[in-house]
Amino acid sequence: MERTILAIGDIIGKPGMRALFAMLPKMKKTYKADLTIVNGENASDGFGLTPELADTIFQSGADVITSGNHIWQQREIYRYLDEQPMMLRPANYPSGNPGHGSCIFNAGGIRLAVLNLQGRYGMWPIDCPFKKANELLRKVKSEADAVIVDFHAENPQEKEALAYHLDGKITALFGTHTHIQTADQRVLPSGTGFITDIGSTGPDQSIIGFDANIGIQRHLTDLPLRNEVSENSAVVSALVVRFDEQSPLTTTEIFPVREAAGF
Amino acid sequence: MERTILAIGDIIGKPGMRALFAMLPKMKKTYKADLTIVNGENASDGFGLTPELADTIFQSGADVITSGNHIWQQREIYRYLDEQPMMLRPANYPSGNPGHGSCIFNAGGIRLAVLNLQGRYGMWPIDCPFKKANELLRKVKSEADAVIVDFHAENPQEKEALAYHLDGKITALFGTHTHIQTADQRVLPSGTGFITDIGSTGPDQSIIGFDANIGIQRHLTDLPLRNEVSENSAVVSALVVRFDEQSPLTTTEIFPVREAAGF
Amino acid sequence: MERTILAIGDIIGKPGMRALFAMLPKMKKTYKADLTIVNGENASDGFGLTPELADTIFQSGADVITSGNHIWQQREIYRYLDEQPMMLRPANYPSGNPGHGSCIFNAGGIRLAVLNLQGRYGMWPIDCPFKKANELLRKVKSEADAVIVDFHAENPQEKEALAYHLDGKITALFGTHTHIQTADQRVLPSGTGFITDIGSTGPDQSIIGFDANIGIQRHLTDLPLRNEVSENSAVVSALVVRFDEQSPLTTTEIFPVREAAGF
Amino acid sequence: MERTILAIGDIIGKPGMRALFAMLPKMKKTYKADLTIVNGENASDGFGLTPELADTIFQSGADVITSGNHIWQQREIYRYLDEQPMMLRPANYPSGNPGHGSCIFNAGGIRLAVLNLQGRYGMWPIDCPFKKANELLRKVKSEADAVIVDFHAENPQEKEALAYHLDGKITALFGTHTHIQTADQRVLPSGTGFITDIGSTGPDQSIIGFDANIGIQRHLTDLPLRNEVSENSAVVSALVVRFDEQSPLTTTEIFPVREAAGF
Ligand SMILES: [Fe+2]
Ligand SMILES: [Fe+2]
Ligand SMILES: [Fe+2]
Ligand SMILES: [Fe+2]
Ligand SMILES: [Fe+2]
Ligand SMILES: [Fe+2]
Ligand SMILES: [Fe+2]
Ligand SMILES: [Fe+2]
């Protein structure tokens, strides 16, 4: 029996939240999603996530929320990270930090592990995502059938390196964080599905979701102007991954999706 | 009359050169290219470009060769940069450096300016690409009808910022350098075509064109292992941009292409 | 006749302001300063400078205030940057930005040019400090006798490179920004005095002026904790440069100073 | 009874090796060193270390050789790293790498542990130096009386943060890697001695030990010119740390030294 994972890229502020709410139910139906993952690290006006917004994301249809470097910016989420098992932050932050970076979702008889990891190149140096991935895989091996990884990272080389390192041991690895969808989706030699980045869910005409004029001015003046979420109409960026439940570590189909919300 | 620009992403070593030679003639025909641009900065085993390889790229069908940060690694190309008008290096390197960063190609009555610029975020700090773009546009204004920019840069925000800054003043801006094709091609509000990166022309199963095992080992050991071009079969990554010659600064169609060489 | 320049390193918040106010008058007398330069970029609780604090720094005895990357954080200073000729910001920010990066101070018959430049390695990419230095030197050549440069930069190689580049053309170049005084003061082969960094004027037991416990926690947790100025007792870090007015581009003596405020 | 540790900063190529050989014996006598540590990561023409050069450093009087990021550049040292107990590489490289990052030297009845760690800010991301330090301290606690740390790091904040984190648990922490001696030596509140960087042992008139003209040209052209060790006369940069053997985790005296070799 074919199983489908639907992953939604970083939600950018109010436009991203509106687009998710309006479009996710239909997309889940269209693609017959068994598991829906949403990266929520930019939902709170571009910087972090609050418990209220996380609740709304779950109500919109997410089964699991993943995140990334921005998750620490709204401190009110820290307790939620501890208490909500399906709310993840990158697993390779130091142990002792609030929250956790993996969970297992039961989808009609199949157990799907979701791991959230973060890169270190061009980012803050945290614990090694390669070693943390190995450690988590040992842990979920007996508890899950399929494994999907949200690798929140800046550097394409690091993303491809982790994907090849895990090839054959996980169902699929997708990147988040750059907010730019890539077109390099493929199945790696040992069966793992991969894409460098699934892009963001937010304003289309923008600089990674933020107002283009502010971004231009920042480059022209080198002044520390703060990003503001663009008010242009939004696009949902997503990824569809399919596999057969008889062979849950082999991706049979993987393709990115971009759907305009029209508002 | 519709005009078409075909741009080919960074050629990676021998696999990239072979794929280009085998496939470019057909692709030019398929897409009816009036102008073909090839980024050659990684043709020499992944690091730079030699005069011999540049000649081969022109013989394969390129009208203009662009480049980027790696162009300085093979010193034998320096004189060629000075002497070949259709061979570009990023224009915003310091004046006094070998070579030049813009040219005008005459395609059956239409004059097409090609500008090559380089980003500074996550890269070596050179002169400002925004100011250099303004300066070059003033210069080519009266000499060219259409203008296309190869912006060789790492950071997606910088790429989008320059594209919006030039929106309406150029035909299209495409990114190179990351070696990963993006899926965010679009026409900006004032008519300029844009894509963050057109990807690379080289081994498909690889880490940005290089051997995946070496890359994995480097991440696991943090040793300074040198990249080697992968020997896997190659893909040509490209971009097609179309406009009407009556309105040469308005992109009517823009789409990326990935074609497997099969060897 | 011997002339003396006294330069005071980055003022860190209230402890730095208090130490400056208490100690600068005596230090000016002790070292017989003809010109006193104070870097004020961190005076406003560690982040930027306000007009009121700038006025206080001048009242404490500064002839010229220099700054750096933090100067843009308090927007109320922008107009002051335009209006106060002896208040500098790095000259190699884009033209069009508020303020200016050089001035000439007349000290009893000798004309002393002060230039403020900023580095680009490990920092935000702005205009080239080497080219901007060349340009400013051409400008002040006929207007000044001695020239002193505050090069606000992170990377030691960039600091030494600019110093050697200007050796023989300026009286002295000192670094600021790292907040750590270096012990490498020397006279370069053609007579220019140099030190990599003069250090900061602020709390001694601290992490670059900020609370050590917060800094430790940030490294242990990788959470985005905000720096707060330490409340420990302060040290004034300074540099003394001497030259003979018959040969104003030749440093005869250069030495750093660290004096504890005792509170 | 007073005990003295003498630490010598990064040896830069042949000039550094010559200066070490000529001056170390006398310096050990002058300062009455019980333990002499030499950082050898740049001995091999500026890039790495060979077994032959390591042997010469030990013969010059080093008891322990420490290193840093450059240690991996000469592969012939890898086996030596495994076999020589007093030859260290940063301990927080991944386990499985050649070599080790700590040792214990017995100096006339007192057991002195030397730890070598490496920073991650502005450098390659490796394992966390804070956690690795904690782990090593637990290990050496019962085996050593005094503990000294060579923290090879770029970023001053990271250096100060680790020093304050270990304050009271180690005798002293000194920085290496920047090649610039700092003037901020002090005893931290709980007794640990600290200095941000002890500087390098190599050519004085240079850019961090390398030829100044090449460095200037690299900044003016942005071409990838390779550093070459300067041939100017050398300086030995060192640190002296003293403590009483009754209280081996309390530094009583700490001061940097710079001695010109005169050739
Ligand atoms: Fe994001
Ligand atoms: Fe992110
Ligand atoms: Fe490149
Ligand atoms: Fe490239
Ligand atoms: Fe600064
Ligand atoms: Fe500062
Ligand atoms: Fe070094
Ligand atoms: Fe180093």
Image (tube, coloured by chain):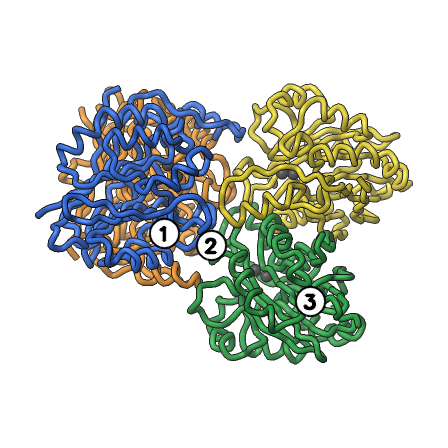
Chain colours: A orange, B blue, C green, D yellow
Q: Please give the label number shown on residue B158.
A: 1
Q: Residue at x 32, y 44 (%)?
A: A65
For the residues labelled 1 and 3, the Cα–Cα distance comes to 37 Å
Q: Residue furthest left?
A: B1
Label 3 near label 2: C-beta < 8 Å? no
Q: Quadrant of the C terminus of chain C?
A: bottom right
- The percent coordinates of residue B23 (x first, y second) are 21, 27
Please tell me how crowded label 2 is: few (under 14), some (14-19), or many (20+) other residues with Cα within 10 Å.
Answer: many
The disc labelled 1 sits on which kind of residue?
Glu
Which element carries disc 1, helix, strand or loop?
helix
The picture places residue D82, in percent across and down from the top left corner, at: 66, 21
Name the foreground residue: D229 vs A193.
D229
Residue A163 coordinates in the image, percent (x, y) = 37, 29
The answer to whether residue B234 is above or below residue B184 is above
- Looking at the rendered image, the quarter that the N terminus of chain C falls into is bottom right
Could you give the CA–CA distance between mark 2 and mark 3, rounded to whole angstroms?
26 Å
B133, A65: nearer the viewer = B133
The three-letter code of the residue at mark 3 reads Ala
Residue at label 3?
C7
* Disc 3 Cβ-to-ligand 6 distance below 8 Å: no
Q: Are marks 2 and 1 on the same chain?
A: no
- Residue to which mark 2 is pinned: C125
Q: Position of residue C228 (x, y in %)?
A: 58, 61
Q: Is residue D95 left or right of residue A88?
A: right
The chain holding disc 2 is: C
